[in-house]
Image (cartoon, rainbow, N blue to C red):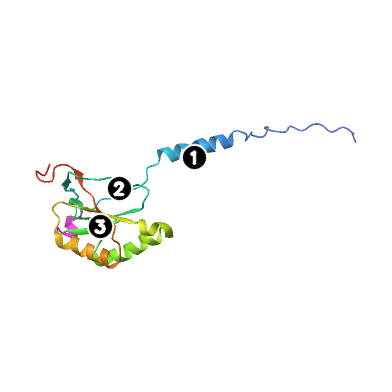
């Protein structure tokens, strides 16, 4: 028996993890900058009417969008050519505006609920009947902050 033991091969040295947090934060920063927040897929034709006296909405306040117009060409075979309401990424009826509004309000903090603005993006060729139905539901639900989205131009000459 020997008193001295032979030194065994230790294999590879351990990997240094000192730079790992730097790499993680660099990747996190890259994805935060490069990621685009998804917006609604527009399923209706939406040629906005012109207006010459327009104001920008304040981005601090919450905004919910309601689109009204004829279904786009991709959806006309399924849904026809009559004017439709689009809430988020689904077609809806005027009666579906009430639960949509309730879910939008439920997603907000309590102090922001009175500031909720409903932005109506209505096609310039849409019929007034469906718009009146939506406005009546909004009135019944006490959603009185309504904005009609337009494009800048001369309303009289339709430019």
Rate crowding at label 2 as few (under 14), some (14 to 19) or many (20 or more) other CA atoms within 10 Å. few
Indicate yes or no whether the magenta region holds residue 78. yes
The quarter of the image holding the C terminus is: top left
Instruction: Name the mark on residue 124.
Output: none
For the point 36% across and 59% down, the residue is 114
* Residue at (15% x, 56% y) in the render: 126
Closer-to-camera residue (13/113):
113
- The residue that label 2 is drawn on is 57
Q: Which mark is residue 86?
A: 3
- Closer to the eye: label 2 or 1: 2
Q: Using the image, determine if residue 4 lies above or below residue 103.
A: above
Magenta residues (range):
75-81
Separation of disc 3 and disc 1 at Cα?
34 Å
**Considering only order in the chain, which callout, 2 or 3, is on the residue closer to the N terminus?**
2
Mark closest to the chain's N terminus, 3 or 1? 1
If the image is split into quadrants, where does the N terminus sit? top right
Measured along the vertical axis of the image, is residue 18 above or below residue 57? Answer: above
Residue beneath disc 1: 28
Percent position (x, y) of residue 54?
22, 45
Q: Residues within 10 Å of mark 3 (few under 14, many from 20)?
A: many
Circle 1 sits in a helix, a strand or a loop, which is it? helix
**CA–CA distance in space, label 2 to label 1:** 31 Å
Of callouts 2 and 1, which one flags the residue occurring earlier in the amino acid sequence?
Answer: 1
Note whether 124 is above or below 25 in the view shown: below
* Tag count: 3
Residue extending furthest toward the front: 53
Tag 2 secondary structure: loop
């Amino acid at each position: 028996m020997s008193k001295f033991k032979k030194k065994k091969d230790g294999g590879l040295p351990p990997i240094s993890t000192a730079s790992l947090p730097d790499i993680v934060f660099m990747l996190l920063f890259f994805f935060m900058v490069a990621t685009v927040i998804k917006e609604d897929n527009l399923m209706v034709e939406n040629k906005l009417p012109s207006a010459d006296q327009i104001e920008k909405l304040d981005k601090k306040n919450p905004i919910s969008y309601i689109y009204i117009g004829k279904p786009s060409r991709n959806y006309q075979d399924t849904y026809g050519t009559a004017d439709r309401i689009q809430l988020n990424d689904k077609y809806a009826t005027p009666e579906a505006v009430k639960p949509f509004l309730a879910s939008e309000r439920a997603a907000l903090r309590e102090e922001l609920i009175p500031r909720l603005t409903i932005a109506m993006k209505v096609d310039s060729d849409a019929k007034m009947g469906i718009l009146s139905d939506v406005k009546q539901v909004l009135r019944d639900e006490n959603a009185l902050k309504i904005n009609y989205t337009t494009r800048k131009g001369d309303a009289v000459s339709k430019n």
